[in-house]
């Protein structure tokens, strides 16, 4: 039995703990460190004045009725405190942002367990690290960004290119680097001052940033030198070149627009060098050097242009640019001409012709349609070319009406997908035929299968309008696309044209011969005419006749020839 003399006085101990707690809270409450104290159940037991001042909270006891998250406006704080209580492990440096008196602030909280007068407690200490964050951001900005334009600098460009090359190595897709230098920038600096030059650099940076894709990088290396890094181009080299060229030309055009700098309007232009890369085949420094070399090539060949480092690609691009310029000039000067390839029936009688456009270049000689027609399609020049062909065809049909040996001929012309998609196409054909007084049945429009299937509803409407007045339609290159018999039934066609790729191998390739027989059968079942193109041998001719094709076009009967020669052949055949 314990003597009463030594029995602990519970009341005295409790009072001592309360005094110690009160003394501790008084000390803590006035500490310059912001904090709040919680009990083991997560209830707020104390908030010091520094915390209230930091969060612009009133100096009262409103905290007694709130959770820590609600009191400070930080809901995630409750969850973290619960985790600390459950695990017994501290939570260091929990960062969060808060708007205090209209200004964004950044705070860092440290949640730890403590003993408070012999009882378990949770201490949440908070620091305002806004100034430190700003300082770190400024250090990062100075290290990775250009101070004038705020674009990535060489260091950050290097990091992004390294990442891009790793992505390229995995995907197999090309990337590209464009080295951009402003033409005659030094003259502007020397004559107008560096402040005007700086304004131009800032304007160029803004235009570049607006004209690249999301994920691409625009950087300034210094002076008037900029770099654009393009990611995730095609995995096919030629397609990647086309994509890079399209973006480069867009940038060149944008940077060539006038600039309003202070009180002057300044005309500038860029010289752009482009280098492609895939994976880690070349180092970053090598790719940048190649783009730099290509840029100097652009400057040395006249400035305000795009040059590729790869010699073969560069030659191809220059040839294409020259061809495009020459083609525009040829259209303006009406340097195109039509050649005519006869179409004959089973008896060898000339029943019509296909008008094929030719371009006699002053230096290149005869330019293949396979070379300039795709370019015309891509650039939109096919529209004036197509209008010219319609005009020439109708004019020629009118002249043939006055010749007894030719007035029966039907003239076929090819219609571009771009032409047919124009809202004015039908009226253009009608107006031109009316202008020359041409009988519509003597004009045949040849359309490609692929275009009809791309927009069959529009094709049906426009073809129907012209068919109603007597214009004939043929489906060119039939069988080379993905024909649908349901479409074929709805299209107002007069004729199917067997593609020469099938005719070429008709006597030695089983698949070609089956395809030709099938096309002839389809035409017969749909009540359509049939004509085979590319007929070059007697064997091909005999095979086609055997299976019911009675109209032909090809070198066996005649090559495409100028108008005078074609008319001479028609007269001889009479």
Image: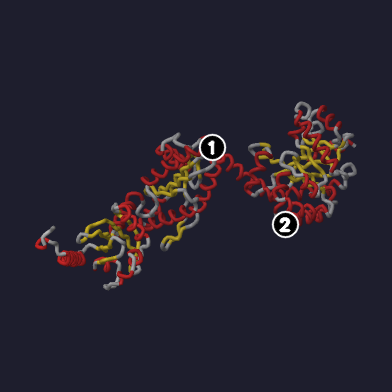
Whole-percent x, y for residue 20 in the image: 16, 64
Which residue position holds label 1?
Answer: 313
Whole-percent x, y for residue 529 in the image: 84, 42
- In which quadrant will I find the C terminus? top right
- In which quadrant will I find the N terminus? bottom left
Which residue position holds label 2?
Answer: 424
* Residue most extreme to the left: 5
Q: On screen, 156 above or below 75?
A: above
* Alpha carbon distance from label 2 to label 1: 38 Å
Coloring scheme used: secondary structure
Q: Earlier in the sequence, mark 2 or mark 1?
A: 1
Query: Is residue 405 toward the left or the right of residue 28 in the image?
Result: right
Query: Is residue 213 toward the left or the right of residue 528 in the image?
Result: left
Whole-percent x, y for residue 425 in the image: 73, 54
Q: Badge 1: how crowded within 10 Å, few (<14), some, or many (20+)?
A: some
* Front-lying residue, 442 or 123: 123
Q: Badge 2: how crowded within 10 Å, few (<14), some, or many (20+)?
A: few
Q: Is residue 396 visible?
A: no
Q: On screen, 303 above or below 434?
A: above
* Residue most extreme to the front: 1
Q: On screen, 177 above or below 147?
A: above
């Amino acid at each position: 039995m314990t003597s009463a003399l030594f029995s602990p006085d519970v009341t005295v101990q409790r009072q001592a703990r309360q005094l110690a707690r009160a003394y501790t809270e008084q000390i803590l409450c006035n500490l310059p460190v912001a904090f709040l104290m919680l009990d083991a159940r997560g209830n707020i037991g104390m908030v010091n004045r520094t915390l209230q001042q930091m969060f612009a909270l009133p100096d009262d006891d409103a905290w007694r009725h709130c959770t820590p998250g609600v009191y400070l406006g930080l809901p995630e704080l409750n969850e973290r405190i619960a985790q600390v209580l459950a695990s017994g492990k501290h939570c260091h440096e929990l960062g969060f942002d808060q708007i205090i008196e209209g200004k964004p602030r950044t705070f860092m909280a440290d949640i730890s367990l403590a003993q408070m007068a012999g009882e378990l407690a949770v201490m949440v200490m908070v620091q305002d690290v806004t100034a430190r964050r700003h300082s770190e951001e400024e250090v990062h900005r100075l290290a990775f960004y250009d101070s004038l334009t705020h674009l990535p600098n060489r260091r950050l460009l290097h990091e992004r290119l390294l990442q891009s090359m790793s992505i390229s190595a995995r995907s197999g897709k090309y990337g590209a680097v464009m080295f951009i230098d402003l033409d005659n920038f030094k003259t502007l600096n020397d004559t107008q001052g560096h402040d005007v030059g700086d304004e131009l650099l800032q304007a160029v940076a803004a235009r570049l940033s607006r004209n690249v894709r999301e994920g691409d990088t625009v950087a300034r290396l210094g002076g008037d030198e900029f770099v654009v890094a393009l990611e995730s181009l095609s995995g096919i080299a030629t397609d990647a070149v086309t994509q890079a060229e399209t973006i480069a030309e867009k940038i060149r055009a944008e940077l060539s627009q006038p600039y309003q700098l202070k009180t002057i309007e300044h005309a500038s232009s860029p010289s752009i060098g482009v280098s492609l890369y895939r994976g880690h085949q070349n180092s970053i420094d090598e790719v940048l050097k190649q783009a730099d070399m290509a840029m100097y090539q652009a400057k040395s060949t006249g400035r305000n242009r795009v040059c590729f480092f790869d010699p073969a690609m560069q030659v191809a691009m220059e040839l294409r640019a020259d061809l495009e310029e020459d083609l525009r000039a040829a259209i303006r000067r009406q340097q195109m001409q039509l050649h005519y390839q006869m179409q004959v029936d089973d008896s060898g009688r000339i029943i019509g012709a296909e008008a094929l456009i030719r371009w006699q270049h002053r230096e290149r000689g005869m330019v293949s349609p396979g070379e300039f027609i795709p370019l015309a399609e891509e650039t939109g020049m096919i529209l004036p070319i197509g209008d010219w062909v319609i005009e020439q065809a109708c004019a020629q049909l009118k002249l043939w009406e006055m010749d007894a040996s030719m007035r029966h001929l039907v003239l076929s012309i090819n219609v571009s997908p771009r032409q047919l998609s124009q809202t004015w196409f039908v009226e253009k054909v009608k107006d031109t035929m009316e202008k020359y007084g041409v009988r519509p049945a003597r004009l045949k429009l040849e359309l490609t299968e692929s275009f009809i299937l791309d927009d069959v509803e529009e094709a049906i409407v426009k073809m129907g309008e012209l068919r109603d007045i007597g214009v004939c339609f043929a489906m060119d290159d039939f069988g080379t696309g993905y024909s649908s018999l349901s479409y074929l039934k709805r299209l107002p066609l007069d004729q199917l044209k067997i593609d020469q790729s099938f005719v070429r191998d008709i006597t030695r390739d089983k698949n070609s011969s089956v395809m030709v027989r099938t096309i002839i059968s389809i035409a017969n079942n749909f009540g359509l005419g049939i004509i085979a193109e590319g007929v070059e041998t007697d064997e091909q001719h005999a095979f086609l006749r055997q299976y019911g094709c009675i109209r032909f076009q090809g070198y066996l009967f005649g090559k495409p020839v100028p108008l005078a020669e074609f008319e001479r052949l028609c007269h001889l055949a009479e």
